[in-house]
Image (tube, helix red, strand yellow):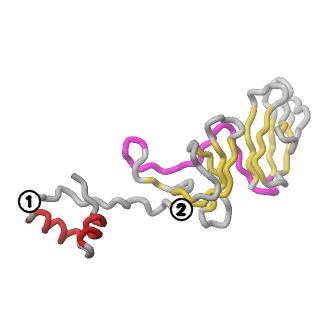
Amino acid sequence: MNASRRWLEEFLRRPLEARELVGKLAMLGAPVDAVESLHAGLGEIRIGLVESVAPHPNADRLRVCEVNDGSSSLKHVVCGAPNVTAGRKYPFAAVGSTIPHGKGGAPMKLERAKIRELLTVKTGDSIVWVNKDMFPHTVTAKDGAFDSRQIEPGKSWTYRAVKKGTFAYACKLLRRMKGTVVVE
């Protein structure tokens, strides 16, 4: 059986030290096998405020969230939770954080991953698309924010990110070539 020390403290209306509690339970005929901290390894997890939620332009079951974690800039997070809501707070672990119970129960370091061609840049950054194919392609935002026109084989097109937002794009000539640019 598992018992929470906090629950026992609330029930008895007094603080209890773990060592004292283990001794008293043993005297009552309920020896304690182990004392485990529930919060061990959670130091890198913070509370994040979800400021906006938008559908992922290239995936039906994913969302792109802007999360305020108390740092100087909002974090763009691809999320699979269907119930995430703007204006609410949730546990948040940034890229580089280690969470205690990853795959198989082992600690897992969170890494930046490319999910369906989602590229995050800062306002003022330049993005260069290089056509390495034998056929012409385009880079066209679905909302009209940018359009490369035709990029010939071996040529490139540069876009300077001036407007903040999330922009889905695709090639007009080969629709399966698509992605999303997030400008912070």
Decide: few, some or many residues near mark 2? Use Cα within 10 Å; few <14, some 14-19, many ≥20. Answer: some
Percent position (x, y) of residue 120? 71, 49
**Residue 41 occupies quadrant:** bottom left
Magenta stretch: residue 122 in it? Answer: yes
132 vs 100, left or right, is right
**Part of the protein shown in magenta:** 103-125
Describe the element under mark 2 as helix, strand or loop.
strand
Is 4 left, or right, of 152 in this rendering?
A: left
Q: Quadrant of residue 37?
A: bottom left
Q: Residue furthest bottom?
A: 14
Dot 2 amino acid type: Ile
Instruction: Mark 2 or mark 1: name the one nearer the start of the chain.
Output: 1
* Spatial CA span between label 2 and label 1: 41 Å
Residue 43 against residue 182 in the figure, above or below: below
Magenta-drawn stretch contains 152 = no
**Residue beneath the point at 84% across and 37% down:** 140
Q: Which residue is mark 1?
A: 29
Residues at discs 2 and 1 in contact (Cβ within 8 Å): no
Q: Identify the residue at horizontal 38%, vertical 41% (top origin).
A: 104
Q: Residues within 10 Å of mark 1 (few under 14, many from 20)?
A: few
Q: Amino acid at mark 1?
A: Gly
Q: Position of residue 36 (x, y in %)?
A: 28, 59
Left or right side of 131 for 57: left
Rendered image: mark on residue 47? 2
Which label was assigned to residue 74? none
